[in-house]
Amino acid sequence: MDYLVKNLIKSGVLKTPRIIQAFRVIDRKDFVTDEYKNMAYEDTALPIGFGQTISQPYTVAFMLELLEPQPGDKVMDVGSGSGWQTALLAHSVGSRGKIFAIELVPELKAFGDRNLAQYDFIKKGIVTNLQMNAENGIPQEAPFDRIIAGAATREVPHAWKEQLKTGGKIVMPIKNSIWCFTKKPDGSFEEEKFPDFAFVPFVHV
């Protein structure tokens, strides 16, 4: 893991001390399936079943650096899968923060629960892992400081924009690009696009 983190820093994608520390503390090997344990520290996406993957470390680092999670933030993490990114977020927001992770596939949600239990984030109340469709967000927990998604959609769901605080960020893939949306005081969004990434599609039902 240390070798992987050093390479991500060397490539320039991993920069923020708090996020670097999260990558060092949260062991990716704890979030891959048994058959891929020997590939846990390779900079590649790995299958976790049901057509989903644990994302490539470079991509996760890129998206977290764009998201800029802060201590105490409330974050909606869409498509939590194995729970690795959820755990990285939980470490980044700290004990005053809150991560609402959403996974549609029941078996993957259970897999994520088992993996996250190794770090006590659910027990400590930092992470709430939900099995549900994320398209309508979580209105009862809004507003959020940050929203991040790990699967590609055709557009940002309107509910996510509504449930984001002013000054907050949405980082997500649309088709084969990563987009960063920052909510301005007038309710409009500043948009940044970063092309040439690959993602599994967003599952709706």
Image: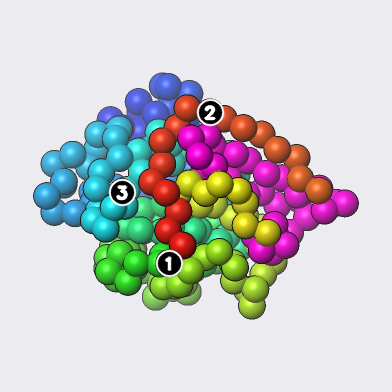
Specify start and end residues of the magenta stretch as a single range.
Answer: 159-187
Q: Quadrant of residue 159?
A: bottom right
- Decide which of 187, 85 is in the foreground and name it: 187
Colour convention of the picture: rainbow
Q: Give me the C-alpha separation between circle 1 and circle 2.
A: 27 Å
Type of amino acid under label 2: Pro
Q: Is residue 135 rendered to the left or right of residue 61?
A: right
Residue 195: image x %, image y %? 53, 28
Residue shown at the point (55%, 56%) measured from the top left: 93
Name the element at disc 1. loop
Q: Earlier in the sequence, mark 3 or mark 2?
A: 3
Q: Provide the residue designation for mark 3.
A: 53
- Decide which of 42, 2 is in the foreground and name it: 42
Residue 74: image x %, image y %? 61, 63
Asked if residue 20 shows in the view, the reply is no
Q: Is residue 42 rendered to the left or right of residue 78?
A: left
Type of amino acid under label 3: Thr
Q: Give me the C-alpha separation between circle 1 and circle 3.
A: 18 Å
Q: Earlier in the sequence, mark 1 or mark 3?
A: 3
Asked if residue 53 shows in the view, the reply is yes
Residue shown at the point (18%, 39%) measured from the top left: 39
Residue 187: image x %, image y %? 82, 53
Residues under numbered marks 3 and 2 in contact, where contact means CB atoms less than 8 Å apart: no
Q: Provide the residue designation for mark 1.
A: 205
Determine the main secondary structure of the stretch shown in magenta. strand
Q: Provide the residue designation for mark 2.
A: 195
Query: In this rendering, which labeled residue sits more in front, label 1 or label 2?
Result: 1
Give yes or no for residue 163 being in the magenta stretch.
Answer: yes
Q: Residues within 10 Å of mark 1 (few under 14, many from 20)?
A: few
Type of amino acid under label 1: Val
